[in-house]
Image (cartoon, grey):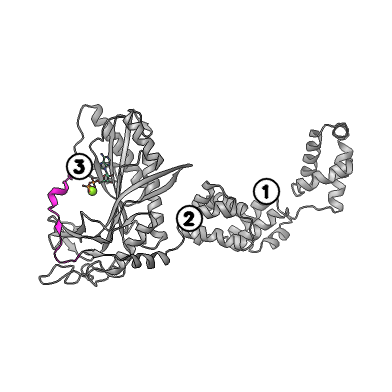
Amino acid sequence: MSETVNTFEAQQQGRPTGPLVRGYEVIIGFETHAQLSTASKIFSRASTAFGAEPNTQACAVDLALPGTLPVMNKGAVERAIKLGLALGSHIAPRSVFARKNYFYPDLPKGYQISQFEIPVVQGGSVTFFVGEEQKTVRLVRAHLEEDAGKSVHEGSHSGIDLNRAGTPLLEIVTEPDMRSTAEAVAYAKELHKIVTWIGICDGNMQEGSFRCDANVSVRRPGEKLGTRREIKNLNSFKFMQQAIDYEIRWQIDEIEDGRKIEQATVLFDPDTGETRAMRAKEDSADYRYFPDPDLPPLVIAADWIERVKAGMPELPRAMAERYVREHGLSEYDAAQLTQSAALAGYFDQAVKAGATPKLASNWITGEMARRLNAAEIGIEAAPVKAQQLAQLVKRIADGTLPNNAARQVFEALWTGEGSDVDEIIEAKDLKPMNDTGALDKILDEVIAKNAKNVEEYRGGKEKALNALVGQVMKASGGKANPAQVTELLKAKLA
Ligand code: ADP
Ligand code: MG
């Protein structure tokens, strides 16, 4: 929290609280809709499965037929509790559902059931890396609500698909704590990681399971918050970055041209790369919120929270801290390895199979990450399995494989040319020259040919030895082990 205090002080003193763009400070706050991974809807028993024929998964409750009543889905509440536990939030022992009134063709009831004054999850924070710098973003709240249906437009016809109506959502709202596009995207990635890690959301952004609204404003350092515009429904990290960058440029241009920013809801068009105003932004008073008389307050007992807690997986940050403590990894490496449960699981497996943690970490965050990126696949699909990486790392640790040879083995494993590390070393003749006749012969030749270096070394010039080691390495085709060569040379020249 010290960061927040520093930010507050800087603001009080008129200093920038973040990087400046053309002299302006950028302020960003996020509202994220995470679709909860329950099998049925939040207030009805209809299925939430994606991609069904229109209107085949909307029951009487979702259609708002007269006489129907909503019944709270316990699984949705449990998922909200999990998020609260993961983010260090207060979980309200009693929260209230409210009606948010507005007219939209895909909203049969004429209101959306949401939470307003008393949300289920309150406060908490998300901590993550932006590059190598750590950043904490505070949460205001996370509340449960139902999704609306969809309007589908085809040619001159429009239709309504109510399959999505009543799908459970958790809307996660931050303080306006982000100060750049990079920070905003890193926050969204971290939140995405957490909700999928704890299994409350499938994280599928194309299908709309995780969509973000970015509230963006700009101001001169020291000024009070500027008017924000809200970019709706960002469903890819790439679009998120493009949309926010565009919005920042646009707002600064407007102000520089002497115009005022009007509060608005805007949409990003990936085709033009621009944001476009959709409607003037409503204020909460426009929705005439009031407690929903059809639903009793949501009461969460302490022992329920305890039970949920007991079933939670180790969280990425706790896991990263454990990697630092138990394996001596740097915080940055530990954060890289805990980017996903799958990646951390892979590292755990490699270590369990006997890999030196530091070396395994270097390979996973280095060569492996590069190859996965290039192939656009996740670690689950990596052709090199954890056991194989462990075997490779063991051969590096015991001095069998110098770097260059290790890369060749990795390549062979990746392409499927071989599957057993020792067999590949054998087949490719990568075994280092040991104290065998061949190496001995090379040593003698090098010593004979480099009389000057030998003399210098014997005369006390330690550096001359490096030249000799280099010659031996060259003559061995890189297969000798430099440490061993150094020892053997010293012995011979003693
Ligand atoms: P609403 O629910 O009407 O959209 P809120 O006040 O709850 O309004 O704010 C929504 C989001 O906008 C929050 O994430 C908040 O941090 C962010 N926000 C509020 N004011 C600003 C601002 N001036 N600039 C950028 N973001 C802001
Ligand atoms: Mg909003």
Q: Residue at x 30, y 45 (%)?
A: 175
Report which residue position mark 2 lands on: 318
Most distant residue in the front direction: 302
- Residue 79 x %, y %: 33, 63
In percent of width and height, residue 484 lies at 79, 48
Q: Is residue 474 left or right of residue 203?
A: right
Between 143 and 62, the one nearer to me in the picture: 143
Mark 3 vs mark 2: give the one in front: 2
Question: Label 3 belongs to which residue?
Answer: 264
Q: Are marks 1 and 3 in contact (CB under 8 Å)?
A: no
Judged left or right of residue 405, residue 326 is: left
Write down the residue under mark 1: 404
Which circle's residue, 3 or 2, is located before the other in the chain? 3
Residue 428, visible in the rendered structure: yes
SS for callout 3: strand
- Given this view, does label 1 or label 3 mark the residue nearer the observer? 3
The response on whether ligand 1 sits within 8 Å of label 3 is no
Q: Which residues fall within the magenta stretch?
A: 278-296
Between marks 1 and 2, how big is the CA–CA gap?
35 Å
